[in-house]
Amino acid sequence: MEVIIQSDSEKGSEIAARLIARQVREKPRSVLGLATGGTPLALYRLLARMHRGEGLDFGSVTTFNLDEYAGLAADHPASYHHFMEQNLFKHLDIPPAQRHIPDGLAKDIPAHCEAYEKAIREAGGIDLQLLGLGSDGHLGFNEPGSSLASRTRIKTLTERTRRDNRHNFSSAEEVPHHVITMGLGTITDSRMCLLLAFGKAKAHAVRLAVEGPVTASVPGSLLQFHQRAKVILDEEAASELERAGYYRWVYQNKPPWQIDL
Ligand code: PGA
């Protein structure tokens, strides 16, 4: 696991944008795993700017989003379909047929989840999976206690996550209890995992995920088993890390042949 600490979220997002841009330039038919929430917003703005200003071409890219609320239609303002359309897809050139988000209104949820897994496999697997971290340590919507081998399926949100996401809904009661999410096994099958976490509210979850034991109680800790996981943090999110000084030194003193950003 490589831990990259930046002074603020804008700088962290710039590194993430450069990594994704490089991935797409090197392999135009890349399969990207995408995330929603407040964390990737600055990154998505940067990708839109690179597309507009530098001609970064997403036309051959395929995407798979991590999750969606069960019971929300794609046009619901709090749905992740709506989020992706507004914050990324309408600014890029990814053909709609190449974008995938779990269907919150799927009638047969197990069959839909199986089909989602199959579509990921048939696309060749995910090259780079973008991730946020829940304040309770979740990845995607894999809440604490999720099987470390889980695949795409229905999950029930913790009250903490429902509270964290309350601001997207008109009332607390309206926040769904159920979601469809890629599993932890699905996520860690990706060839590269790129986790972003910014702000003080994430500091404890970051500490547990990066320096705690690997446990289903902190789904983010599973990244410790991944061969190519990068964790990009701002100072606030890194503030509880014991080895922060070491991570900074490592990043600032990489031999030139190892610098991949
Ligand atoms: P956030 O959510 O980006 O809105 O903080 C992250 C997550 O819940 O995974």
Image (tube, rainbow, N blue to C red):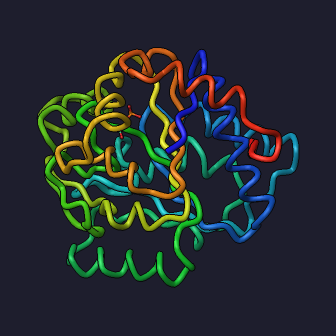
Q: Based on the displayed image, in which of its 4 quarters is residue 146 positioned?
A: bottom left
Residue at 50%, 58% (x, y): give it: 227
Q: Based on the displayed image, in which of its 4 quarters is residue 188 positioned?
A: bottom left
Percent position of residue 42, x then y: 60, 30
Residue at 36%, 81% (x, y): give it: 115
Question: Going by the image, does 192 lie left or right of 157?
Answer: right
Q: Residue furthest right?
A: 54
Question: Going by the image, does 261 lie left or right of 99?
Answer: right
Percent position of residue 111, x then y: 25, 81
Percent position of residue 258, x then y: 74, 46
Between 95 and 151, the one nearer to me in the picture: 151
Between 23 and 108, the one nearer to me in the picture: 23
Residue at 34%, 34% (x, y): give it: 211
Q: Where is 58 relative to 235, above or below?
A: below
Q: Where is 10 relative to 25, above or below?
A: above
The quarter of the rendering in which ligand 1 is drawn is top left
The C terminus appears in which quarter of the rendering? top right
